[in-house]
Image (tube, rainbow, N blue to C red):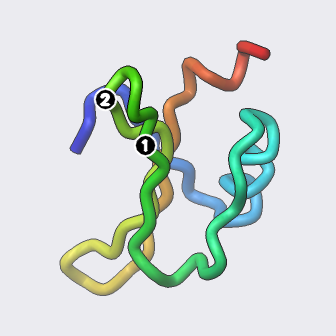
Amino acid sequence: MDSNLTEIKNAHLFMEYLMCIGAKSPHSRRDDWELVDIDKKRVLALIKKDTNGDTKFFICAALLGRK
């Protein structure tokens, strides 16, 4: 897991944060997904299932204050 990512506990809030950083939302909140900055080679947002099958949402919080 990237250390620059912060877990977001609410799926709706995660989607709002994606809109704030100008990212396109994934088609499904249940499938694994990641948004990668190719130039800087880092993950900006991530949806991942844990070992229990629960969906977890992560985002680079540093991006939320920028625009």
Sequence-wise, the earlier of marks 1 and 2 is: 1
6 versus 25 height, above or below = above
Say which element carries label 2. loop
Mark 2 lies on residue: 41
Mark 1–mark 2 contact, CB under 8 Å? yes
Q: Nearer the viewer, residue 5 or 28?
A: 28
Horizontal side of residue 61 vs 32, given as left or right: right
Give the residue drawn at x 44%, y 75%.
55
| Disc 1 residue type (three-letter) | Val
Check disc 2: other Cα within 10 Å, few if <14, some if 14-19, many if 20+.
Answer: few
Give the residue drawn at x 43%, y 56%.
34
Point out the image quarter for the N terminus: top left
Label for residue 36?
Answer: 1
The image position of residue 4, as x and y in percent, is: 36, 26
Check disc 1: other Cα within 10 Å, few if <14, some if 14-19, many if 20+.
Answer: few
Give the residue drawn at x 38%, y 39%.
43
66 versus 30 height, above or below = above
The image position of residue 54, as x and y in percent, is: 39, 80
Based on the displayed image, in which of its 4 quarters is residue 65 positioned? top right
Give the residue drawn at x 49%, y 46%.
45
Say which element carries label 1. strand
Horizontal side of residue 2 vs 31, given as left or right: left
| Disc 2 residue type (three-letter) | Lys
